[in-house]
Image (cartoon, rainbow, N blue to C red):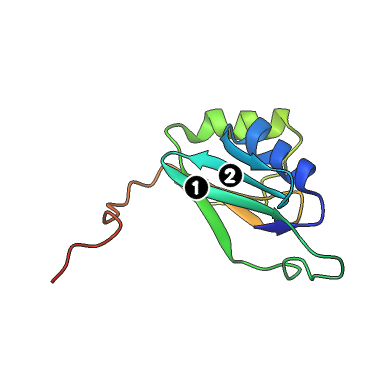
Amino acid sequence: MRTADLARLERFYVDVLGLAVLRRDEARGSVWLDAAGSILMLERAEAGEPGPPAGSKDLVAFAIDDQEDWRARLGAAGVAVEAETSHTLYFRDPDARRVAVSTYRATAPRWPPSPP
């Protein structure tokens, strides 16, 4: 995810969502965050680089255990829930990207997939 304000976006994903910093490269302007074994990379955008399209429904989703705990956590952080289903809360990060936290248990294949 590219951003004009790397420190602000890092604070959101660390402080609000609880991701841990794995690596920070000041020279390159990047931060790698641990998302339960996957890496979420945040990178400083170049001057004039466009941000996410306004109102985009593209999103990144994170698995959670308790939707009501997360509703309270987001509220305490001043993050508005913009939509929800019986399993998922949708909200925006500081760059207006859509983010979701969901109790839905999908069975995801391991990466990389096994050869045929």
Residue at mark 1 = 39
Q: Position of residue 106 (x, y in %)?
A: 32, 52
Of the pair 98 and 21, the residue shown nearer to us: 21
Classify residue 77 as left or right of residue 73. right
Of the pair 30 and 90, the residue shown nearer to us: 30
Q: Residues within 10 Å of mark 1 (few under 14, many from 20)?
A: some
Q: Position of residue 15 (x, y in %)?
A: 67, 31
Of the pair 25 and 72, the residue shown nearer to us: 25
- Residue beneath the point at 54% across and 28% down: 69
- In the rendered image, the vertical position of residue 26 relative to residue 98, given as above or below: above
Q: Which structural element holds mark 1?
A: strand
Residue ranking furthest to the right: 48
Pointer 2 or 1: first along the chain: 2
- Residue beneath the point at 86% across and 70% down: 48
Residue at mark 2 = 32
Q: Which quadrant does the C terminus fall into?
A: bottom left
Q: Position of residue 75 (x, y in %)?
A: 70, 33
Question: Which amino acid type is shown beneath numbered disc 2?
Answer: Trp
Q: Is residue 88 among the parts visible in the rendering? A: no
Give residue 43's quadrant in the image. Answer: bottom right
- In the rendered image, the vertical position of residue 53 relative to residue 18, given as above or below: below
Q: Do the residues under discs 2 and 1 have CB atoms within 8 angstroms?
A: yes
Q: Is residue 13 among the parts visible in the rendering? A: yes
Classify residue 7 as left or right of residue 23. right
Question: Which amino acid type is shown beneath numbered disc 1?
Answer: Ile
Question: Of the numbered discs in the image, which one, if any, rests on residue 103?
Answer: none
Q: Which structural element holds mark 2?
A: strand
- Residue beneath the point at 63% across and 29% down: 73
Q: Position of residue 1 (x, y in %)?
A: 64, 57
Gap between marks 2 and 1 measured at Cα: 6 Å
